[in-house]
Image: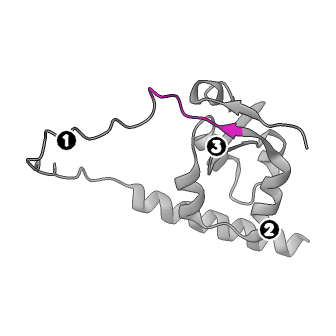
Amino acid sequence: MAELKSFTLADLSQHTTKDSLYLAIHGKVYDCTGFIDEHPGGEEVLIDEAGRDATESFEDVGHSDEARDIMSKLLVGEFKTDSSEKPKAKSPSSSTPRPIPAAEPSDSGSLQYVLALAVVAGCVIWKVLL
């Protein structure tokens, strides 16, 4: 098997359209361009996550073994974070705990529900059509 290409966040950010759509998931980069129309959750889900690390979104929805098999065919590289992208280590001199800021209200729970519902509906439709 050929050696996989390394992609940085800057590399990924150049692939955010239907004509060239890459996602990073669990440290691997996938070219989803040819899969956009086949994605059971719809193209919008992929386009929204295009050009970045989509690991959290991918796992939040919960994908089947079949989906993971399809992904293996789309693998094009490995995702490498730059040192500037890595979180900074906590300073050992700051042992005083900081107060936790109040959370802003968000609709992420609703979005996750809608995404999960879209994936389930897509899977059902896909199974019916097969």
Residue at 53%, 62% in the rendered image: 60
Q: N-terminal of the two: label 1 or label 3?
A: 3
Please give the name of the residue rendered at 22% of the width and 38% of the height, measured from the top-left corner: 91
What amino acid type should be assigned to the residue bearing mark 3?
Answer: Ala
Q: Which residue is mark 3?
A: 24
Name the residue beneath numbered marker 2. Answer: 66
Q: What's the CA distance linking mark 2 and mark 3?
A: 18 Å
Whether residue 17 is situated above or below residue 67 in the rendered picture:
above
Q: Where residue 122 sits in the image (x, y, percent)? A: 72, 65
**Which callout, 2 or 3, points at the residue further toward the start of the chain?**
3
Q: Which residues are magenta?
A: 78-84
Residue 118 appears in view: yes
Q: Quadrant of the N terminus?
A: top right
Q: Amino acid at mark 2?
A: Glu
Please tell me the numbered disc located at residue 75: none
Secondary structure under badge 3? strand
Q: Which residue is mark 1?
A: 92
Residue 5 location in percent, x, y? 76, 32
Give residue 75's quadrant in the image. Answer: top right
**Residues packed near mark 3 inside 10 Å, few (<14), some (14 to 19) or many (20 plus):** many
Q: Which secondary structure class fits the magenta region best? A: loop
How many labels were placed on the picture?
3
